[in-house]
Image (spheres, rainbow, N blue to C red):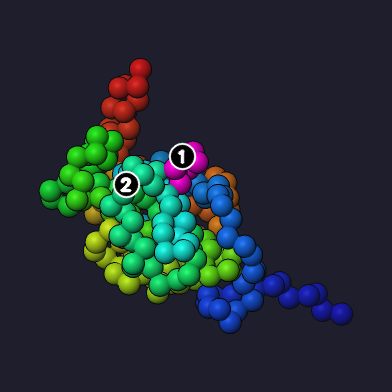
Amino acid sequence: MSPKAPERKPNKVSRHTSAETAAMPASLEPMLPTLVKLPFSDPQWLFEPKWDGFRALCFFKDGKVRFISRNRRNLTRQFPELQEISKLIKARTAIIDGEIVALDRSGKPSFEALRHRQHRGAIAFYAFDLVYFDGQNLSQYPLVARKAALKRILRKSFTGRIRYTEHIEEQGERLFRELEAMKLEGMVAKRKDSVYAFARSRSWLKIKTSAGRTEMQKRIESWK
């Protein structure tokens, strides 16, 4: 008797697939990347910019959005302008993972502007994962399927208050060089087939640029 073939994860998310049906949770733990030192390239991985902002889960229900930080702080009232996002999500209910970012006049993320609430008009939510959609728990779908579904439900993917986080496949070292040149915070590497683990995971890895390491050291010194 031949061994049972391993169960394959679905590659496409839609209302007609076998996604687990579940009530929308009121809160959940975000998936966290593990810090590593060096960038790498690998065809089984995709690579995204690491945004310098507040990590948050966006809960969309009844035409309203609610933002919860990784420490379970409610950030909704802190960023009232992000209510505009509710008009840009093509769903009845959704949980979107992303980063609340303040952009400076050149369009680059500025953590200081975010902390001190400067440039209020430049606040945006950079979305990079879709955990729940219209009654379906998507956490066991591969990352590439979740990202494809996320892109489909955003009415405006690249500008405005909510922005889809683009990625490149395989060529992590090339993206990292570009992020270094732009003096951005760093890069996140993610396995294409990774499920959404509600904990820290080695399926997602973060790599700091020299600018990102310097900025983090400054913050540590300021906290002393």
Q: Which residue is mark 1?
A: 73
Most distant residue in the right direction: 1
Left or right of 50 in this view: 66: right
Left or right of 195 in this view: 175: left
Residue at 32% in and 72% down = 155
Mark 1: few, some, or many residues within 10 Å (few <14, many ≥20)? few
Write down the quadrant of residue 85 in the picture.
Answer: bottom left
Residue 16, percent from left and from top: 58, 82
Secondary element type, mark 1: loop
* Residue 156 higher or lower than 41, as above or below: below
Q: How many marks?
A: 2
* Residue 32 higher or lower than 214, as above or below: below
Q: Amino acid at mark 1?
A: Arg
Instruction: Give, as a single range, the part of the protein colored magenta.
Output: 68-74
Q: In the rendered structure, find residue 79 and report the number of the disc placed on it.
A: 2
- Residue 44 appears in view: no
Residue at 38% in and 68% down = 89
Q: In terms of secondary structure, what is the magenta stretch mainly? A: loop
Q: In the rendered structure, find residue 198 and report the number of the disc placed on it.
A: none
Q: Amino acid at mark 2?
A: Phe
Residue at 64% in and 69% down = 21
Write down the quadrant of residue 154 in the picture.
Answer: bottom left
Q: Are marks 1 and 2 in contact (CB under 8 Å)?
A: no
- What is the spatial separation of the Cα atoms under label 1 and label 2, in whole angstroms? 13 Å
Left or right of 5 in this view: 162: left
* Residue 15 higher or lower than 104, as above or below: below
Point out the tag, 1 or 2, that comes first from the N-terminus: 1
Most distant residue in the front direction: 62
Tell me the quadrant of the picture where the N terminus can be found: bottom right
The residue nearer to you, when weighing 187 against 96, is 96
